Amino acid sequence: MDITFIVWTLLTGIGAAIVYLWYQRRFVGDFVRKLLTIDAVSPETAVTIEELHCKMTPPLMLALREEGTLYEAVLKTEDDIPRYYVAEGKRAMLKAKYKNESVSFFGVVLGICILVVIGIVFTALYPVLSEYLGGLLSAE
């Protein structure tokens, strides 16, 4: 297996992680920050997705389902239209985890561009470095 393949695979994985983290912070984080802002901390103060001006996106659905990242921290009422609130004792954890707005989309694109440049530079320099280091090691 060629080392350039390994490097490109690694860079692709890092790029995918950047996009995933942005997506999580953007959609799930937006939902949590709005819940914390309006102080929905009990069934009496719980609110619907529509009242939060959010959409039930796939990342949010995954986070709210059983075994999701928000399953024990954000609870829902058993009404016809579910209403959501922050579970007792989970406010500080959610506040710390989702305190910052997400990285801008420009930052994500810039990060991926930097990864592509690193990959191209590595692909261009690898044969030269390999030959140079091979020559150094065989000179002994």
Image: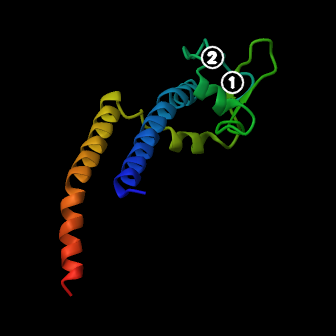
User: Residue 35 at what x, y percent from top left?
Assistant: 58, 26
The residues tagged by marks 2 and 1 sit, at their Cα atoms, a distance apart of 8 Å
Front residue of 107 and 13: 13
Kindly state the secondary structure of the residue where label 1 is placed.
strand
Who's the residue at 30% across and 29% down the image?
106
For badge 2, the amino acid type reads: Ile
N-term-proximal mark, 2 vs 1 = 2
Determine the image quadrant of residue 90: top right
Residue 136: tell me if it is visible. yes
Residue on which disc 2 sits = 49
Residue on which disc 1 sits = 84
Determine the image quadrant of residue 56: top right
Residue neighbourhood size for the residue with mark 1, other residues' Cα within 10 Å, grouped as few (<14), some (14–19), many (≥20): many
Q: Are marks 2 and 1 in contact (CB under 8 Å)?
A: yes
The furthest residue to the bottom: 140
Q: Is residue 71 left or right of residue 37?
A: right
Q: Is residue 17 above or below residue 82?
A: below
Q: Is residue 57 above or below residue 16?
A: above
Q: Is residue 28 left or right of residue 11?
A: right
Kindly state the secondary structure of the residue where label 2 is placed.
loop
User: Residue 116 at what x, y percent from top left?
Assistant: 29, 41
- Image quarter in which the N terminus is found: bottom left
Who's the residue at 22% across and 59% down the image?
127
User: Residue 5 at what x, y percent from top left?
Assistant: 39, 51
Residue 41: tell me if it is visible. no
Q: Is residue 7 above or below residue 87?
A: below
Who's the residue at 38% across and 56% down the image?
2
Residue neighbourhood size for the residue with mark 2, other residues' Cα within 10 Å, grouped as few (<14), some (14–19), many (≥20): some
